[in-house]
Amino acid sequence: MEQDTRKAQGKKRFWLGAGAGFLAAALIFAGSWTVWQLSSYLYTGNFASGETSKSDVEEKLDKINGLIEAYYLYEDEIDADALIDGIYSGYASELGDPYTVYYDEEETQALLETTSGEFSGIGATMSKNTASEEITVVNVYKDSPADKAGLKDGDILYQVDGKDTAGQELDTVVSWIKGEKGTDVSLSVIRDGEEITTVATRDVIQVQTVEYEMKENSIGYIMVSEFDDVTYEQFKEALADLEAQGMAGLIIDLRSNPGGNLITVTDMLKLLLPEGIIVSTKDKYGNVEEITCDGKNEFTKPLAVLVNQYSASASEIFAGAVQDYGTGQIVGITTYGKGVVQQLMDLRDGTYLKLTIAEYYTPSGRSINGEGVTPDVEVEYEYNADDPQADNQLEKALEVISAEMG
C-alpha cells in the first residue's frame, strides 16, 4: 500500500460491523420501496423469529420513519447512503460474530486491494507525523514508478498534482496518488530544504508481503506480514534464493501476521511439509474438506516459526501444521486463537459480505479456536530501551536453530 497500513490491515481483519442503530433512519430518503425491499430480503430464509412477521417489520419501520421525518433536528445533515449501508452493517453485526462483516463500496475496494496484494499507484509508503502533520515518504519500492521518478526515503510530500497536502488526512493524500495504470501524477517534495517536483507514471504495484535475509551461521530469515494472493510467489522466491546461498537452517517470522488467503498459506506449506493433511474444514452441515500435501518438497533442515499474540488465522494454520508434523519448532507466545474460515461473497452491487462458513482443524485434528497455538519454546518480547532494535524472541529462535545445527 502507499501508506503504513500493516497494523491497520490487521485491525481490519477483525473489524466489527457497524451497530444497528441506523436501521430505520435511512428510510427518510429510501421511501416505501426500500422498506419492502429490505424487509423482504432480511426475512428470506429462516432468520425471522416466529413472533415477528414481515408486515410487523414494515409497520415498525414506517412508524420510526414518520417520527424521524416529523421531529429529527438534523435531517439536512444526514448522509442517506451511509445510513442505508448502516442497515446492512447492523444486520450483519447483530449475528454476534466478530468476523462476519458487511463492506460498503469504498470498504469493498480497499478490502479487495488488501487481499490481492496489488493496487495501481506509484509504489511508495507514506506516513504522517502526528506532531508536524507532514507527510513523509518512508519507503520507495525498488524499480517502482516512485523510484523511477526519483523519490527518496525521507522526502516530505507537500503537493500532489498542485494540491497542498497540508491539513489533509493521509488517506486523502494516498487517494490522490493512486489512479489508473498509465496515468501520470505530479509530486512535489522537500528534500534537504530544496523543493523538487517530479512526475510518476502509475502502474500496478505488488505489496511486498515477504522480506528475507541470511543471518549469521547461514541461518535464513523470512518475515511474512500477511497471506495475500502475491505472497506465495514472494515466499517461494525467498526460499529458493536462501537455498542458493547455502542456507543451513530457517526462521519464518509470522509475528503480528493477521492472516489472509487460505489457498495462499496452504500452497506455501506445500513447500515445507511431508505428505499428509495440511488443514481440514467443517461447515454447518458437517461436510469436511481436506487440503493435502504430496510431500515432494519436504523441508528437512532445522526450522523455527516465530509467533505472537497477534499471529492469527492463516498464521495459525501455518504454525499448527508445522507443529503437528514436527517439521519445526514454534517460538514466541500463544497465538490469537482464530480457528474459523470466512468467505467473501459478492453482493453484485459493488459491496461484499464476509461470512464465517466453517471451522478449521490442524493436521492432528486440533481446533485452536479461542485457544491459539501454544509455542514449543515460550518467550515473551522484552523491549530494550538501551537497544530498541534488539529482538529477544528472534535471538531465541536463532539459538534454537543453532542448537539443532550442532
Image (cartoon, rainbow, N blue to C red):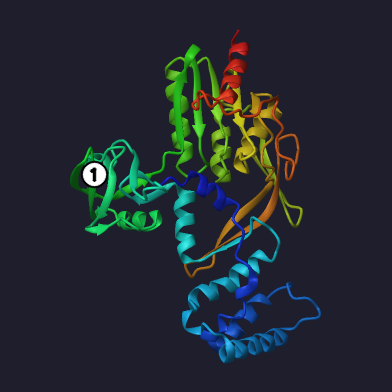
Residue 64 at x, y = what percent? 64, 86
Front in this rendered view, residue 301 or 373: 373
User: Number of callouts in the render?
Assistant: 1
- Which quadrant of the view contains residue 155? top left
Residue at (74%, 76%) from the top-left corner? Answer: 48
The residue at which mark 1 appears reads as: 190
Label 1: which secondary element: strand
Which of the image's four quarters has the C terminus? Answer: top right
Check the image and name the residue furthest to the front: 131
- Image quadrant in which you'd find residue 369: top right
Location of residue 31 (image quadrant):
bottom right
Residue 268 visible in image: yes
User: Horizontal placement of 196 versus 117: left or right?
Assistant: left
Q: Residue at x 66, y 75 (%)?
A: 42
User: Considering depth in this image, is 293 or 13 the residue closer to the camera?
Assistant: 13
Mark 1 closeness class: few <14, some 14–19, many ≥20 residues within 10 Å: some
For the point 54% across and 67% down, the residue is: 347
Q: Is 64 located above or below residue 114 in the figure?
A: below
Q: Position of residue 37 (x, y in %)?
A: 59, 82
Q: Position of residue 25 (x, y in %)?
A: 58, 80
Along the viewing direction, whichever of 251 and 43 lies nearer the viewer:
251
Q: Amino acid at mark 1?
A: Ile
Residue 2 horizontal side relative to residue 288, left or right: left
- Residue placed most toward the observer, 215 or 75: 75
261 w.r.t. 325: above or below = below
